């Protein structure tokens, strides 16, 4: 190919990257104030039900942070990301711990922060490719730059999957406890957080021995963090 051809390709790629960068920045900035009508994971779940001819209804009810029990916010931090108020999107301490565990032959586990999970669940698709991981890093940086911590937590609580086709603590609380998210107690919030590693495999309404043990551990962590006063760090 002639040099001019490579130059033209380079210009097209640069314009595409520039448009993506500006577009993604504006999208993240807009969602700082507007409730997401859906998320990438919810959309993928809906498409999956169409593909498999299932008639399962998607449960998703956006609820402002002020109308969610503080116990729910504390529980997801205790179970998923205890250093959430202090890091800038990536928990390098936890990453180091995971690498050390891997060297010792222990089972592989994730080290994603709440910010990373919001970036993935809101904007991206499932997978382990370098492209998807790179986009996750980009969106995580944008979230940390453009959103306050409380907004990241608010969106996480609203789009996290807590059961089959059940997204957000409001829908989960009404489905499993027959009450709004504002009335969740500490043990109920811990039960919801306990299934987050795999909400399809684990059940809130029919908890296994592992989920009950994890629930008790999360409740202990909630107490050690200082209770809901830990949210004042956000």
Image: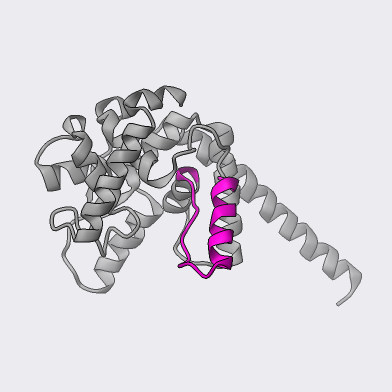
Left or right of 23: which side holds 201? left
- 227 or 34: nearer the eye? 227
Q: Evaluate whether residue 192 shows in this view.
A: no
- 11 or 34: nearer the eye? 34
* Residue at 36% from the left image edge and 23% from the top image edge: 229
Q: Is residue 15 on the magenta stretch?
A: no
- 174 or 113: nearer the eye? 113
Image location of residue 234, percent across then percent down: 46, 26
Image location of residue 139, percent across then percent down: 55, 47
* Residue at 28% from the left image edge and 61% from the top image edge: 46
Image location of residue 47, percent across then percent down: 31, 64
Tell me which segment is drawn in magenta. Answer: 91-115
Count of picture labels: 0
In the figure, residue 140 lies in which quadrant?
top right
* Residue at 73% from the left image edge and 59% from the top image edge: 12
Furthest toward the left, the residue is 178
């Amino acid at each position: 190919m002639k040099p001019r051809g490579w130059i033209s390709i380079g210009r097209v790629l640069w314009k595409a990257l520039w448009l993506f960068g500006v577009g993604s920045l504006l999208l993240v900035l807009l969602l700082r104030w507007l409730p997401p009508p859906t998320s990438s994971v919810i959309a993928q779940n809906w498409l999956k039900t169409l593909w498999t001819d299932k008639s399962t209804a998607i449960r998703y009810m956006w609820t402002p942070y002020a109308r969610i029990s503080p116990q729910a916010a504390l529980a997801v931090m205790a179970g998923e990301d205890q250093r959430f108020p202090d890091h800038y999107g990536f928990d390098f301490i936890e990453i180091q711990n995971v690498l050390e565990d891997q060297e010792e032959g222990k089972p592989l586990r994730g080290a994603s922060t709440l910010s990373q999970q919001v970036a993935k669940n809101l904007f991206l698709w499932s997978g382990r490719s370098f492209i998807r991981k790179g986009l996750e890093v980009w969106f995580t940086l944008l979230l940390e730059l453009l959103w306050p911590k409380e907004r990241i937590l608010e969106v996480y609580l609203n789009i996290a999957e807590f059961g089959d086709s059940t997204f957000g603590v409001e829908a989960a609380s009404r489905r499993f406890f027959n009450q709004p998210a504002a009335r969740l107690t500490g043990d109920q919030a811990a039960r919801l957080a306990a299934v987050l590693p795999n909400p399809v495999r684990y059940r809130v309404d029919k908890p296994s021995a592992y989920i009950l043990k994890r629930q008790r551990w999360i409740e202990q962590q909630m107490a050690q963090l200082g209770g809901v006063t830990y949210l004042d760090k956000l």
